[in-house]
Amino acid sequence: MKLEVPAWIKVGILLLLAGLYVFVEPLQFSIRRVVLILSMVDITAMKYYILSFGIWAPVVSFFLMVFQSVAAPLPAFVITFANAALFGWVKGALLSWSSAMCGAALCYGIARFYGRSVVERFTSKFALEEADRFFERYGKYAILIARLLPFVSFDVVSYAAGLTSIGFWEFFWATGLGQLPATLVYSYVGDILVGSVKTFVFGILSLISVSVLVVVIKKIISERNKQSAKV
């Protein structure tokens, strides 16, 4: 039985968050600074920003990834590269993967809790419609494929998944599996090439992602052909 949350509680949470942003100036300044760094895809600036928190750097990085997920579609790989540069590619990958999982789960939960109208304000109506078409085209494979493509906003897909009939654990495990290869590659490359030409790095990652996508699509086509043959 689904528990209905009173509307006043839902509105109250949003008003509380909005109030914190408006009236707590240090928080507002920090959010604007992070959004600017992510928007500019400035890996070096992100690295030094996280490093400025000293021993709290891993914790701050964790919450930055979660924030990035909710504030879609900001680029997550900026934080992933910074984590690899600061903590090494293994620890950086673990930090990026776990925080991205938490962020994805939060996006899914927000969509379930508030519904489409509120989610559209976090993303956009156009982005959600694109995600809807993505789910219609790839079905249960949509979550896995979305994480393999650097030009698809996985955070928007996480929101969209929360609006579908896909169960949380099905979404969660597909998310973990789908984002693991990309996180490992991003972290390894980020540890080696951070500070190099971003276009070159993005090209390498895109090539890898497309290669993996081809394998997934072949599998989908093969399964559909088998199902058609049985009919």
Image (tube, rainbow, N blue to C red):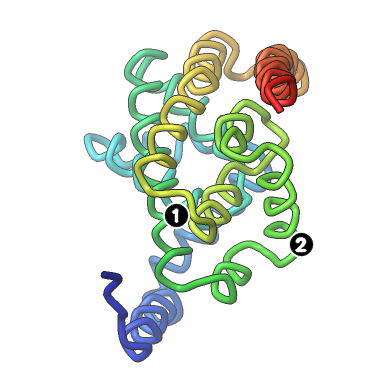
Image mark for residue 126 = 2
**Residue at the extreme bottom of the image, as rendered:** 8
Measuring from the top left, give residue 158's x and y in whole percent. Answer: 52, 49
With respect to residue 62, does 158 lie above or below?
A: below
Residue 108: which numbered mark, if any?
Answer: 1
Q: Is 24 in front, or is 91?
A: 91
In the rendered structure, the answer to whether residue 101 lies left or right of residue 182 reads left
Name the foreground residue: 206 vs 168. 168
* Residue type at the position of mark 1: Tyr
Work out whether residue 203 can be spotted.
yes
**x and y, in percent, of residue 10 in the image:** 37, 81
Local packing at callout 2 (Cα closer than 10 Å; few below 14, some 14-19, many 20+) is few
Callout 1–callout 2 Cβ contact below 8 Å: no
Residue 227 at x, y percent in the picture: 67, 25
Give the quarter of the figure containing the N terminus. bottom left
Q: Residue at x 66, y 16 (%)?
A: 219
Q: State whether residue 197 appears in this view.
A: no
Query: Would you call the spot at circle 1 few (<14 residues within 10 Å), some (14-19), or many (20 or more)?
Result: many
Q: Is residue 79 above or below residue 16?
A: above
Looking at the image, which residue is at 63% across and 30% down? 145
- Which of the 4 image quarters holds residue 88? top left
The amino acid marked with disc number 2 is Phe
Q: What percent of the width, then of the height, locates residue 142?
A: 62, 37
Compute the Cα span from label 1 to label 2: 18 Å
Up-down: is 165 above or below 98? below
**Nearer to us in this view, 213 or 71:** 213
Which residue: 49% across, 23% down? 183
